Amino acid sequence: MEQEINQQQLSQPEQKSGGKMKNLILVGVISSILGALIVGGIVYLALNNSYSVKQTQLNNQISVLQNQIEALKKQNEVSQQSPTPKQAHPSTSDNTIGWKTYENKEIGLSFRYPTNYGDFQVSINNGETGKKFTGGFQNNKYFSIGGITADFTAGRSGYFLDFVKYLYEGGKYYHLMALDKRWLVEPIKTITVDDQKVLIVSGDSYVEERNVEGPTINPGPNSGALINMPSTGEFKGVAVWNSDKKVLPQSDFEEIIKTFKFTK
């Protein structure tokens, strides 16, 4: 009996020792699991935070791109609504680069011309009454200008450069000479130069001289131009004569006329 009691007493410490061991193992397992959970949670949070940051950055980039797309759409709409500017055509002045300039303040005009025409010279002379002016190039005798005052007389028959100004009355044009002598003119065409209407004429433009032989007022078989000048001086107009279209082509003649400027 006593022997059995002793054996039970001896076995109790062993059981207690075994229980402690199991508890330690359980605690270790639980600690390991808890540690793993903690580490996993930290990793998850870190990954989740990184994902959130990247997601935010991506959203920002998407927002920027959307704004740029909207801006481009608006620009495209504006460009479609706005009228397309017309392409500028080269003006005649492009062909006159390098040309010389002649100016006469007394007459009230200036113009440009090719340098190979030489100097342009103008003379102003008295008639029996009134005044006249004529001008021409040193190296091109086929281009000339002229005009007279309204009271000019010279004791001779008139010609094309005896020009005071042109009149426009009743829908018709007239070449006005001195002492109110008028010649009905039907211009080939009109052009505008420095806000002034220019009448381009030929021999056939002078209605009353058609099929007339002998001295005439018209420019003959070639061409001319009649221009009113806004000058407040003595001369109110200038006639420009191309006396040989074969030597001085009409296009070159008109190119010079298009450079005319008038003193207001």
Image (cartoon, rainbow, N blue to C red):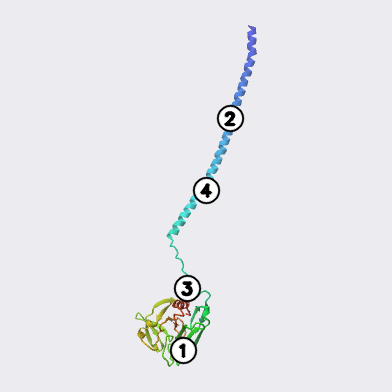
Q: Is residue 107 left or right of residue 188?
A: right
Nearer the camera: disc 2 or disc 3: 3
Residue 73 at what x, y percent from top left?
46, 54
Q: Which residue is mark 3?
A: 92
> Which element is circle 1 on?
strand
Residue at the far top in the pictured view:
1
Question: Which of labels 3 and 1 is toward the front?
Answer: 3
Mark 2: which amino acid?
Leu
The residue at which mark 1 appears reads as 131
Residue 16 is at least partly visible in this image: yes
Q: Which residue is mark 4?
A: 61
Q: Which is in the foreground here, disc 2 or disc 1?
A: 1
Q: Secondary structure at mark 3?
A: helix
Q: Residue furthest left?
A: 170
Packing grade of label 4 (10 A; few <14, some 14-19, many >=20) is few
Q: Nearer the viewer, mark 1 or mark 4?
A: 1
Distance (Cα) linking label 2 and label 4: 40 Å
Distance from Cα at disc 2 to Cα at disc 1: 123 Å
